[in-house]
Image: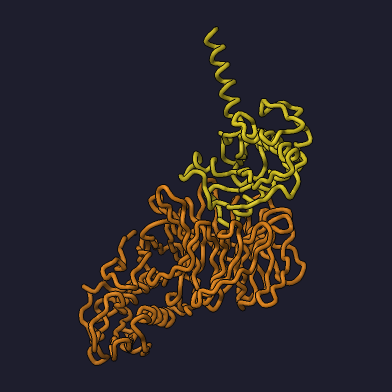
Chain colours: A yellow, B orange
C-alpha cells in the first residue's frame, strides 16, 4: 500500500514537472489533444493543465523564476497543424497575463515545423503557429505591439534526426522574451 | 535491371574548375540510344584535363537519360576526319550515331572547337559546328555541343549549357550553421559563391534571362526577398513587408514576380511588378496560399493552398476574379509545383503518411505518376527542356540533389562534397 502511494506521488510530481515543456507524446497527426482556439472562452474553469492558478497579474520579476509556469517557453504542435493543444493554451494564458501586466516587455514568437513537407509551405505553417499563440496572448490582454513574429519553417530544427522523436521537438513555437 | 556507374567527374585534375557536386547515374540505362563519342583530337597544345570536351559531352549525354555513350575501350577506331570513318564497321558496334571533333589551340587563351555528328546507318553528317573558345569557356562549349546533339536527335532543346543554383548548409561542430547560396554548371563544375549567411537562405529562382537570382534571406533577422545579379553581384531588396516574404518566382517575361506575403494576416499570393514596384493581390483566403509558379504563357499561376484542409495544388488566373481551380485530388499532401516548359506537366511533392515523393501531374489527362521513392524528397524543378526533374533528397542520411527522368526510369544523384545541399533551381539559359 505504501509503495502504491509513493508511486502515485512520484507520478503526480513528475507530471507536474513535465507539464507544458514537453511535446505531445502521441505525435503524428489526428491527435485527439488538438484543441481549438475557440475553446479559449472557458478561461481557467476546467483546472486541467498547469496546476498553477491563473493570477490577475504578474510581477516583472516572475519571468526569471525557474519554478514558475512562465519558465515554459515552447509550444508544440501536431503535424501540419496550427491548433494549440489544451495544455499549451494554459501555458500561453499565463504568458498573456504576464505581458498584459508588464506592457513594457516585448516578446518574439518564433514559428517552426519539422522537416517533412515543402519548405515554403512550412514557413507559412510555422507562421500560423506563431499567429495562433499571438491570438491567445492578446486574448489575455497582451498588446499587439508587444509581440513580434518570425517564421523559420523547417530551417532551424531544435533536434536533428529524421524520425518522430526529432520531429515532435521541431514542430513548435518558441516564446522569446526580448 | 539496375546498373551503377560513375561518371568521371572525380577530382583527377584539381584545376580551378573543380566540381563541388559529384554526379552518379544510379538507375536506368536501358532504352537509351547507343552513341559513339570519339575522344576529340587536341592540336596546337596539350589537352586540358579539366576541359576534356569529348568526355564532358559523353557525360552530359549519359545524364540526359536519352543516350548511352559507348565506353572508350569499346571504340573500334579514333577517326579524326570524315574520310577516316568506316561506317560499316561502326554499324557492327551497334551504335546509331557517331561524334568526332577537334580542339585546336591557337594561342594561350584562344581555342577553336569543331565537332561533327553522323548518322551511322546512313553514313551521313547530321551536324557540324565550329566554336571559338577561351580557356574558361571550354566546358561551356562542351555543354553547348551536348545541347546541339540532343536537340538534333531528340528534338528536346538544350539543358546542359545552363547553371544550377542551390543552397547549402554547413554545420561545423560547436558553431552555428552557415548557409551558402551557390551556382554551378549543370555537372557541378565552376561553382560560384553568391551569398554566405549565418541565417537561412531559401527559395532561389532564376530570372528568365539567367542573369539574376531572386531568393529569400533571413540575414537581417527576418525573411526578405532579394534580387541578385550574378555578374555584378549587385543586390536589390525587393520585398520587406512585415511577416512572410517568401517563394519568389519570375514571370516568363521577367517583368513581374509572384511571391507569398502575410502582411494582410494570412499567407497569400501577390504579384510584384518589378518595374514600378506595384503590388497586386492574387489570392485572399484564410488558409495558407503559397509556392506560386507561373504557367509558361504568364496568364495563370499554380500554387499550394490548404483551403481544403490539407495542402493541394490550385491554378488561378493572373487577371480576373475567377476562383482558383483545384488540380490535385489524390492524397493528403500535394505541394510545391514546378511547371514544364510546354505547360503540360506539373511536378510536385506528394506526401502520404511519412513518405514525401516527387510526382508528376499530366494536365490534359489528370493522370498522376509517382517518380521517386522518398521518404523526404522535395523542391522539384523541371529541367529547361522538361525531360528531367531535379529535386532534393536524402541518401544514406545525407541531403543530396537528385534528378529523375519524367518517365521515372532514369535516376542520378548529385552529391555535395560536404554539407547539406537543397533547393535546386535550373536556369533556362546561361548568361
Above or below, comparing residue B126 to residue B377 in the picture: below
Foreground pick, A175 / B186:
A175
Above or below, comparing residue A168 to residue B264 in the picture: above
Across the whole image, how many numbered discs are drawn on residues?
Answer: 0
Foreground pick, B30 / A100:
A100
Residue B397 can be seen in this image: yes
Q: Residue at x 44, y 63 (%)?
A: B404
As drawn, is B89 to the left or to the right of B236?
A: left
Q: Quadrant for the N terminus of chain A, please.
A: top right
Q: Residue at x 71, y 55 (%)?
A: B266
As drawn, is B315 to the left or to the right of B200?
A: right
Q: Position of residue B216 (x, y in %)?
A: 57, 63
Location of residue B8 by image quarter: bottom left
Q: Position of residue B370 (x, y in %)?
A: 50, 57
As drawn, is A98 to the left or to the right of B235?
A: right
Residue B114 can be seen in this image: no
Q: Residue at x 28, y 88 (%)?
A: B105
Q: Position of residue A83 (x, y in %)?
A: 67, 42
Q: Position of residue B278 (x, y in %)?
A: 72, 72
Q: Residue furthest top?
A: A1
Above or below, comparing residue B202 to residue A135 in the picture: below
Foreground pick, B193 / B295:
B193
As drawn, is A139 to the left or to the right of B404?
A: right
Amino acid at each position: 500500500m505504501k509503495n502504491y502511494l509513493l508511486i502515485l506521488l512520484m507520478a503526480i510530481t513528475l507530471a507536474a514537472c513535465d507539464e507544458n515543456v514537453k511535446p505531445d507524446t502521441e505525435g503524428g497527426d489526428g491527435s485527439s489533444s488538438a484543441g481549438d482556439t475557440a475553446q479559449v472562452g472557458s478561461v481557467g474553469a476546467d483546472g486541467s493543465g498547469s496546476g498553477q492558478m491563473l493570477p490577475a497579474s504578474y510581477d516583472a520579476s516572475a519571468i526569471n523564476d525557474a519554478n514558475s509556469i512562465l519558465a515554459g517557453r515552447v509550444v508544440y504542435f501536431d503535424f501540419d497543424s496550427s491548433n494549440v493543444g489544451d495544455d499549451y493554451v494554459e501555458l500561453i494564458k499565463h504568458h498573456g497575463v504576464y505581458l498584459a501586466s508588464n506592457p513594457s516587455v516585448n516578446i518574439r514568437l518564433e514559428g517552426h515545423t519539422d522537416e517533412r513537407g515543402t519548405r515554403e509551405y512550412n514557413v507559412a505553417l510555422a507562421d500560423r503557429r506563431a499567429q495562433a499563440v499571438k491570438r491567445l496572448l492578446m486574448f489575455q490582454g497582451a498588446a499587439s505591439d508587444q509581440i513580434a513574429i518570425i517564421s523559420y519553417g523547417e530551417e532551424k530544427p531544435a533536434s536533428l534526426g529524421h524520425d518522430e522523436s526529432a520531429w515532435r521537438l521541431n514542430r513548435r513555437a518558441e516564446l522569446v522574451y526580448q | 535491371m539496375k546498373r551503377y556507374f560513375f561518371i568521371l567527374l572525380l577530382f583527377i585534375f584539381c584545376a580551378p574548375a573543380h566540381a563541388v557536386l559529384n554526379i552518379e547515374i544510379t538507375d536506368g540505362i536501358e532504352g537509351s540510344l547507343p552513341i559513339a563519342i570519339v575522344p576529340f583530337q587536341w592540336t596546337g597544345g596539350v589537352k586540358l584535363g579539366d576541359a576534356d570536351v569529348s568526355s564532358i559531352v559523353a557525360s552530359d549525354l549519359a545524364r540526359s537519360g536519352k543516350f548511352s555513350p559507348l565506353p572508350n575501350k569499346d571504340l573500334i577506331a579514333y577517326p579524326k576526319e570524315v574520310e577516316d570513318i568506316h561506317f560499316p564497321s561502326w554499324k557492327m558496334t551497334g551504335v546509331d550515331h557517331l561524334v568526332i571533333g577537334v580542339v585546336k589551340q591557337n594561342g594561350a587563351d584562344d581555342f577553336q572547337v569543331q565537332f561533327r555528328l553522323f548518322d551511322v546507318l546512313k553514313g551521313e553528317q547530321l551536324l557540324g559546328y565550329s566554336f571559338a573558345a577561351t580557356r574558361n569557356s571550354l566546358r561551356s562549349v562542351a555543354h553547348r555541343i551536348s545541347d546541339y546533339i540532343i536537340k538534333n536527335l531528340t528534338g528536346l532543346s538544350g539543358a546542359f549549357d545552363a547553371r544550377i543554383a542551390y543552397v547549402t548548409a554547413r554545420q561545423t561542430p560547436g558553431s552555428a550553421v552557415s548557409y551558402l547560396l551557390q551556382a554551378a554548371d549543370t555537372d557541378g563544375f565552376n561553382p560560384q559563391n553568391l551569398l554566405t549567411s549565418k541565417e537561412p537562405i531559401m527559395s532561389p529562382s532564376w530570372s528568365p534571362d539567367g542573369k539574376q537570382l531572386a531568393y529569400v534571406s533571413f540575414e537581417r533577422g527576418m525573411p526578405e526577398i532579394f534580387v541578385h545579379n550574378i555578374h555584378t553581384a549587385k543586390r536589390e531588396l525587393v520585398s520587406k513587408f512585415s511577416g512572410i516574404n517568401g517563394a519568389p518566382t519570375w514571370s516568363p517575361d521577367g517583368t513581374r514576380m509572384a511571391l507569398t506575403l502575410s502582411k494582410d494576416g494570412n499567407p497569400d499570393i501577390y504579384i510584384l511588378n518589378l518595374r514600378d514596384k506595384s503590388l497586386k493581390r492574387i489570392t485572399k483566403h484564410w488558409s495558407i496560399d503559397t509556392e506560386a509558379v507561373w504557367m509558361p504563357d504568364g496568364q495563370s499561376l499554380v500554387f499550394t493552398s490548404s483551403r481544403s484542409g490539407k495542402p493541394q495544388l490550385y491554378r488561378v488566373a493572373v487577371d480576373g476574379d475567377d476562383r482558383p481551380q483545384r488540380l490535385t485530388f489524390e492524397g493528403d499532401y500535394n505541394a510545391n509545383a514546378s511547371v514544364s516548359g510546354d505547360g503540360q506537366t506539373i511536378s510536385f511533392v506528394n506526401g502520404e503518411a511519412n513518405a514525401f515523393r516527387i510526382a508528376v501531374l499530366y494536365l490534359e489527362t489528370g493522370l498522376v505518376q509517382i517518380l521517386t521513392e522518398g521518404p523526404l524528397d522535395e523542391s522539384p524543378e523541371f529541367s529547361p527542356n522538361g525531360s528531367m526533374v531535379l529535386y532534393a533528397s536524402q541518401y544514406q542520411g545525407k541531403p543530396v540533389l537528385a534528378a529523375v527522368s519524367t518517365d521515372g526510369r532514369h535516376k542520378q544523384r548529385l552529391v555535395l562534397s560536404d554539407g547539406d545541399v537543397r533547393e535546386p533551381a535550373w536556369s533556362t539559359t546561361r548568361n
